[in-house]
Amino acid sequence: MRVPVVIYASEALLRDMDDKVGEQAANVARLPGIVTASYAMPDAHWGYGFPIGGVAAFDPDAGGVVSAGGVGFDISCGVRCLHTGLGRDDIMSVQKSLADALYKRIPAGVGSTGAIRLDDAAMDTMLLRGARWAVDNGWGLDEDLERIEEHGRMSGARADAVSDQAKRRQRDEMGTLGSGNHYLEVQEVTNVFDEAAARAYGLSVGDVVLMIHCGSRGLGHQIGTEFLKQMAISAAEHGIALPDRELACAPIRSALGEKYLGAMRAAINCALANRQILTHLVREVFAEALPAARLRLIYDVSHNTCKVERHRTRGTTKELYVHRKGATRALGPGHADIPSPLRAAGQPVLIGGSMGTASYVLAGTTKSESLAFSSACHGAGRAMSRHQALKEWRGRQVVDALAARGILVRSPSLRGVAEEAPGAYKDVSAVVEAADASGLARRVARVEPLICIKG
Amino acid sequence: MTRRWELFAHDADMGVRGFGATVAEAFEHAALAMTSIVTDVELVDAQEEISIECEAPDLELLFADWLNAVISEMSARHMLFRAFKVRLDGSRLHGQAWGERVDAARHRPAVEIKGATYTALRVAFEGNAWMAQTVVDV
C-alpha cells in the first residue's frame, strides 16, 4: 500500500462491517498518486473496486489517476432537500391525495419515461449547462441555482466525450426518478441538534421538507460502463498494475483520463438537470394540492463524484482529484464554495435513510478537511443483500406496516419495496452518530418520512 | 443440466451466474438471470428481436461487455428480454435477444440494472459445465 487505510466507524458498526470494505480500501491505497490515506466512511459496505463509502484523493503531479470505478455507475447520484414552507398538519390533511398525486406525476421505476424529449442540440446544451439549462427552460427558479453544488453547472464538461449510446439512453429519461434505492420523500423535521445551523438552513421541529434521491440515469450508467472497460484494457499501457480490474483507472494527465473527466462532468450536469426537473414537477403537484406551499431549495449535494479540490497534503495545499463513491462532500464553515446564507454554518450534508427510518441533515466541519478531505457518509448503507431481503419480507407486508405508522409508500413494484425494506439497511442513526462523533460532520436535524415515492 | 442460471448475493447489489455446455450458452443463461432480477422471466413475451454485437480482448471482459450491451438495450429501448442467442467468434460476440417493451402493470419490474461490474467476474469450466458470473449494479 502507498498510503494507510483509515476507517471511520463506531465499534459496533466496525464489527458489522463487511471484511471486503477493508480489503477494497486497501486495494485503493495501492493506486498510483493516492495521497494521505484511503478512507472508508461509517456507512461503508462492499462495493465494486472501491468500497461504497470510499474516499480517495489523487495528485496529478505524482502520477495520480482518475477511476471510473471510483465514481461508480450512477455518476452524481445525490440528494436534494427542499423546504415546503408547510407543517405536519398541512400535509396530513391531504396526505393520501398528495401521495397519489406525486406518484402519478413523478415518473418512477423501470421503463418509465419523462415528458421531455431531447434532440441532439438540446442534449449537448443540457450536458454543458446542467441545472442552469433546466432553469433556462422554465423548470425551476434562478434562486435554486445558488443552492446547488457548482451553482448548478459543473464546468469542464465535454458533450463530445459522451457516446451516442449514452445520449440515446437519456433521450427520454430527463425528469425520471429511477428505481432501486432512489426515492422522493415528504418528511417531517422531528429533532434539531444544532439550533444555529438549523436556523441557517431554515429548519425547525415540525417543518415539512422534501428529499429527492436520484442520479444521472441511463446516461451516467452508460458512461460508467464504457470508461470502466476502456480503463481496464488500457491500464497496462499506462503502466498501472490493477489489484482488481474494477479499480480500472487512467492517469489524470492522459487522453483517456481527460476524456473520462469531461464525460463524467457532463453526467454530473445531467444529474443536476434531472433533479431540477423533478423539483419542478414536485412544485406543480404542491401548487395544486397545497397552494400555500412554497418549495425552497435548501441544498443539493452529490455523493458519487470525482472533483478537483484544493486540500492540504504533505505540508502544502494543492489541487487534488477527490473521488467520493457513496460519500458526501462536507465543506466546513466559511468555505467559499458554500452559498453565502449557509456559509457560517457549514455545507449541508444530506443523508438519506431507508423508507420508514429517519434521514438526517448534517453540516460540514472544519475538522473534516484534515480527517477525510472534507467528506462524510451518504446514507445508511445496506446491511442485507436484496436476495436476503426478498426472503425476509413481502412488499405488501412492508407497505402495510409503514402505513400503520403513518407513512404512505407508493411504488410500481412490491418486490422492489421488499428489496428496499427498512430492515435491509443499517441503522442510519448509528451511522450519523459515528460521523458526528468522529468529526466528519455534525448533526443538525433528523427528519422522518410521511410519504415515500419509490422507483 | 438442471440449473441454467442462478442469482447470488452481494451486499448492495446482485450477482448473476449462467451455466451451459458451451461458453455461449453460459452467457445466454447469465443474461436470463439478469432479466429475473427485474421481473419473472415467464411474464415476458418474445415479440421483438434485436441484435447485439460486442468485442473485448478476453473472455471475462467479453462477458461483462455482453451483459452491459444487454443492459444498455433494455434501458434505451425500455425492453425486457426472455430469450438470448450468443455466437462467439474469437474476441467478438454476435448476440440476439427476444423480448418486449416494459409493461409496468404486467411485469411489475422490481429494479433497474445500471451496469455489469467486474466484481466476482469469472468465466470458467467447472465440474462438467461452463459457468459465467459477475455482480450487476442495481
Image: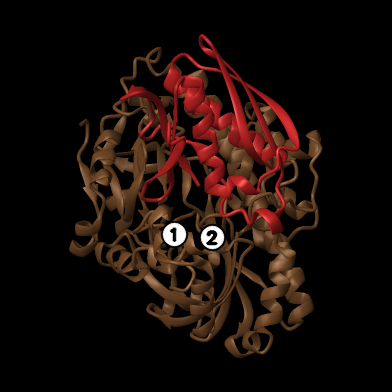
Q: Nearer the viewer, residue A307 or A54?
A: A54
Residue topped by disc 1:
A390
Crowding near the residue tagged with mark 2, few <14, some 14–19, many ≥20 C-alpha atoms within 10 Å: many
The chain carrying label 1 is A
What amino acid does circle 2 point to?
A: Arg
- Which quarter of the figure has residue A335? bottom left
Q: Are the two marked residues, 1 and 2, in contact with CB atoms closer than 8 angstroms?
A: yes
Q: Residue at x 38, y 57 (%)?
A: A388
Q: Residue at x 57, y 42 (%)?
A: B35
Q: Is residue A106 left or right of residue A351?
A: right
Vertical placement of residue A448 versus B7, above or below: below
Furthest-top residue in view?
Answer: B90
What amino acid does circle 1 point to?
A: Leu
Residue A415: give its label.
2
Vertical placement of residue B136 versus A349, above or below: above
Q: Secondary structure at mark 1?
A: helix
Residue A149: give its label.
none
CA–CA distance between discs 1 and 2?
7 Å
Evaluate whether residue A71 shows in this view. no
Vertical placement of residue A260 versus A328, above or below: above
Q: Residue at x 59, y 36 (%)?
A: B71
Q: Is residue A74 left or right of residue B46?
A: left
- Which quarter of the figure has residue A208? bottom right
Q: Which chain is red?
A: B
Placement of the N terminus of chain B among the 4 image quadrants:
top left
Q: Is residue A149 left or right of residue A84?
A: left
Furthest-front residue in view?
Answer: B1
Image location of residue B20, percent across then percent down:
45, 26
Q: Which chain is brown?
A: A
Q: Nearer the viewer, residue A64 or A89?
A: A89
